[in-house]
């Protein structure tokens, strides 16, 4: 789907404030509400606009310990991959989860309260699926940039 400048502006506005009303969005892109709604509907129908959510401050909930967990495996079978991905995807502490190229096979961003909770997560991870050959974790000391807004140009 080709995006014009109005589509891009709508997406940028929503990325910065998902609570904007249809009237506010329409006014910001110089449209009336019906054509604006039709554009939003088209963006949703094409899967570009997936959902509108609230961003919660993790520190305010005591979730200030961020770990990046790197996993290696010797088992690269289709079955193992699906079992591992399915299991890890169910862990609520895992905020992001990737299959990687390079030295490690998988990487996840884990958010927990403290080192004790991370140790509990680690034990759950390594005991959940056979075939993990190495787990390395690094811990964030300070977040220097965090955004959910995509660079729409």
Image (cartoon, rainbow, N blue to C red):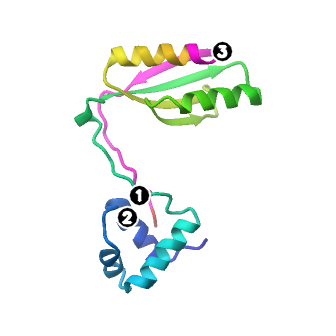
**Sooner in the amino-acid sequence: mark 1 or mark 3:** 1
Answer whether residue 5 is magenta in the image.
Answer: no
Q: Identify the mark nearer the N-term, 3 or 2.
A: 2
Asked which quadrant contains residue 13, the reply is bottom left
Res 33 seen here: yes
Residue highlighted by disc 2? 14
Q: Is residue 3 above or below residue 92?
A: below
**SS class of the residue under badge 3?**
loop
Q: Of the numbered discs in the image, which one, if any, rests on residue 52?
A: 1
Q: Residue at x 49, y 13 (%)?
A: 123
- Magenta-drawn segment: 127-151
Q: Residue at x 43, y 67 (%)?
A: 11
Question: 56 above or below 120?
Answer: below
Identity of the residue drawn at 31% across and 24% down: 113
Between the residue at mark 3 and the residue at mark 2, the CA separation in whole angstroms equals 42 Å
Q: Dot 1, how many residues are within 10 Å of its Cα: few (below 14), some (14-19), or many (20+)?
A: few
Whole-percent x, y for residue 48 in the image? 53, 63
Instruction: Specify whether 85 is left or right of 43.
Output: right
Position of 140 compared to 92: left or right?
Answer: left
Q: Which circle's residue, 2 or 1, is located before the other in the chain?
A: 2
Q: Residues within 10 Å of mark 2 (few under 14, many from 20)?
A: some
Residue 24 percent coordinates (x, y):
29, 75
Question: In the drawing, what numbered circle is on residue 73?
Answer: none
Residue matched to label 3: 130
- In the image, taking residue 76 as reference, residue 70 lies left or right, namely left
Secondary structure character of the magenta stretch overall: loop
Q: Residue 129 colored magenta?
A: yes
Circle 2/circle 1 CB separation < 8 Å: yes
């Amino acid at each position: 789907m080709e995006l014009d400048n109005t589509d891009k502006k709508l997406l940028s506005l929503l990325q910065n404030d998902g609570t904007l009303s249809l009237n506010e969005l329409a006014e910001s892109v110089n449209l009336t509400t019906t054509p604006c709604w039709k554009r939003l509907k088209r963006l949703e129908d094409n899967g570009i606009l997936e959902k509108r959510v609230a961003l919660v401050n993790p520190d305010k909930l005591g979730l200030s310990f961020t770990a990046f967990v790197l996993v290696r495996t010797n088992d690269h079978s289709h079955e193992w991959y699906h079992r591992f991905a399915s299991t890890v995807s169910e862990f609520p502490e895992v905020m992001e989860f990737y299959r990687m190229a390079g030295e490690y096979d998988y990487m996840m961003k884990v958010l927990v309260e403290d080192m004790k909770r991370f140790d509990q997560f680690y034990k759950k991870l390594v005991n959940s699926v056979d075939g993990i050959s190495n787990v390395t974790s690094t811990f964030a000391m300070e977040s220097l940039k965090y955004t959910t807004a995509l660079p729409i140009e």
